[in-house]
Amino acid sequence: MSERKKVTAAVIFKNGKVLVAQRSPESSLPNKWEFPGGKMEENETPEDCLKREIQEELNIDIKVKEYLCSSFFDYNHISIELMAYTCEWQSGKLKNNEHQALSWLNPEELRGLDMAPADWPIVEFILKS
């Protein structure tokens, strides 16, 4: 398998709930839930990637606060390192530009979702914290 792609995930909390996004039926991993984020571009830091991706996908500006954990996963089509960071919503009106659904959930509710496999270790980390 080729080199691992570096992917970022924003764990955005608001009023004790965390934002999750459901992938579109046409995407890879159709209908799976995930923490919003995306692939890092060349010479991009994880923080810059998160700010760019969240602005593109959700139309909001965030402050990247702290690194949480990384998850390594080999999908059929790609091998990734998913780096999760807690983020704070700074400004903008939430707009769904890419996913089929967005949801604010209590952390315990994440257990009931059909999450993308690489996102499960992040869920477990959040539940232990």
Image: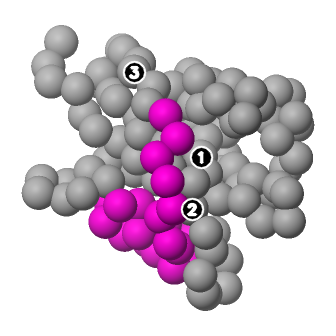
Image location of residue 60, percent across then percent down:
56, 78
Q: What is the spatial separation of the Cα atoms under label 1 and label 3, in whole angstroms?
A: 15 Å
Q: Is residue 81 above or below residue 46?
A: above
**Amino acid residing under circle 3:** Phe
Residue 99 seen: no
> Around disc 1, counting alpha carbons within 10 Å, would you say few (fewer than 14), some (14 to 19), or many (20 or more)?
many
Do residues under tags 1 and 3 come within 8 Å of each other at their CB atoms?
A: no
Q: Quadrant of the C terminus?
A: top right
Q: Is-magenta flag for residue 61?
A: yes
Q: Residue at x 60, y 87 (%)?
A: 91
Q: Residue at x 57, y 54 (%)?
A: 86
Q: Nearer the viewer, mark 1 or mark 2?
A: 2
Q: Residue at x 50, y 72 (%)?
A: 63
Q: Which residue is mark 1?
A: 35
**Amino acid residing under circle 2:** Cys
Q: Which residue is mark 2?
A: 87
Left or right of 44 on screen, residue 67? right
Q: Is-magenta flag for residue 115?
A: no
Residue extent of the magenta highlight: 47-69
